[in-house]
Image (tube, rainbow, N blue to C red):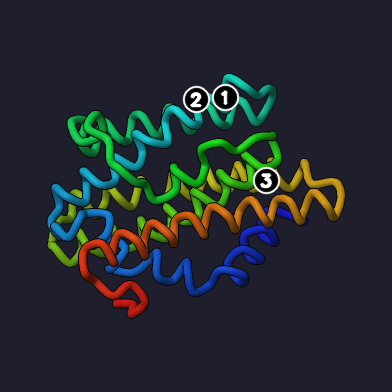
Amino acid sequence: MDADTFRDDLRAARDTELSRLSSSKAVYALTGGEMDGDAVRAGTARELAALEPIFADWADGGDGDAAALFADVTEFAADSAGSFDGAAAADGADRHVVADALAGREGELARLAAAAAAFLVLDELAGQLVGFFVGDADRTSADEFRTFRTALGEHGDAAAELLAARCETEADEEAARDAGAAVVDGAYDWYVETLESMGVEPKNVC
C-alpha cells in the first residue's frame, strides 16, 4: 500500500461522509451557525488548539521520522490557531471535528493513519472555508486559508507516506484503514450531532 492508495481507499469507503464534511453545512456546524469570517476563524482556531496537545504527546512518545512529523504538526497547529484567533483557541470547545477521534490512539501505525485521515478531513473542510471567504469578497482571508489548506495537504502527505513505509503486512494495511476510517467516522458524528443539536437536517448537502 502506498500513500495514495491509503487515501483513495479511505475516500472510496467514506465518500458520503467526506462529501458532507466538505459542504457548507460543515462550515455552519464549525461556526455554530454564525456564518461570518470571525466565526470561521474562531472555529478553526479551536479545532487546531485541540489538536496541538495530542500531536505534542505523540511527538514525545515516538521517535525518528514519526516523532519529527508530530513535532512539526504540533508547531503548525499552535501557530495557525494563534494566527486565526488566539482568544478562541484559548477558550476551547465542547466537541471537535477530528481532535476527539485522535485522542487515545496508541501505536505509531495507528497514529500515523489517524493523522493522515485527520488532515484529509480538514483539507476537505478547508476547501469550503476558502470558498466562504471568496464568496464574502475577502481576498486576504481567502488567500490565508488557501495557504493553510496547502499546509494541511503537505502534512497529510507526510503522514501518509510514513504510514505506507510502515505497513509491511496485509494486517498492517487493514489496521491502518480501520484507524483512518474511525477518524472520518468520528468527524462525521461531530457533523451530525452538531447540526441536529441546532435543529438542522444533516443529511441534505448544500
The reply to whether dot 1 and dot 2 touch (C-beta < 8 Å) is: yes
Label 3: which secondary element:
helix
| Quadrant (top left/top right/bottom left/bottom right) for the C terminus | bottom left
| Residue closest to the far top | 60
Assess disc 1: are there few (<14), some (14-19) or many (≥20) residues with their C-alpha within 10 Å of its C-alpha.
many
Mark in the foreground, 3 or 2: 2
The residue type indicated by label 2 comes to Ala
Element carrying mark 2: helix
Question: In the image, is residue 122 above or below residue 60?
Answer: below
Residue ID at (17%, 67%) = 135
In primary-sequence order, the first of circles 3 and 2 is 2
- Residue 83 is situated, as x and y percent measured from the top left of the image, at 25, 34
Q: Residue under circle 1?
A: 59
Residue under circle 2? Answer: 56
Image location (x, y in percent) of residue 64: 69, 24
Cα separation, mark 1 vs mark 2, equals 5 Å
Front residue (pair 36, 105): 105
Query: What residue would you read off at disc 3?
Result: 161
The quadrant of the rendering that contains the N terminus is bottom right
Q: Tell me which residue sits at (34%, 61%) in the image.
A: 193
Task: Please name the amino acid that badge 1 sits on.
Answer: Ala
Pair 1/3: label in front: 1
Q: How many marks?
A: 3
| Residue at the bottom extreme, as displayed | 204
SS at mark 1 in the image: helix
> As shown in the figure, which amino acid type bears the numbered disc 3?
Glu
Left or right of 2, for residue 69: left
Q: Is residue 105 above or below residue 7?
A: above
Q: Position of residue 154 (x, y in %)?
A: 51, 45
Q: Measuring 85% from the left and 46% from the top, which residue is drawn there?
A: 168
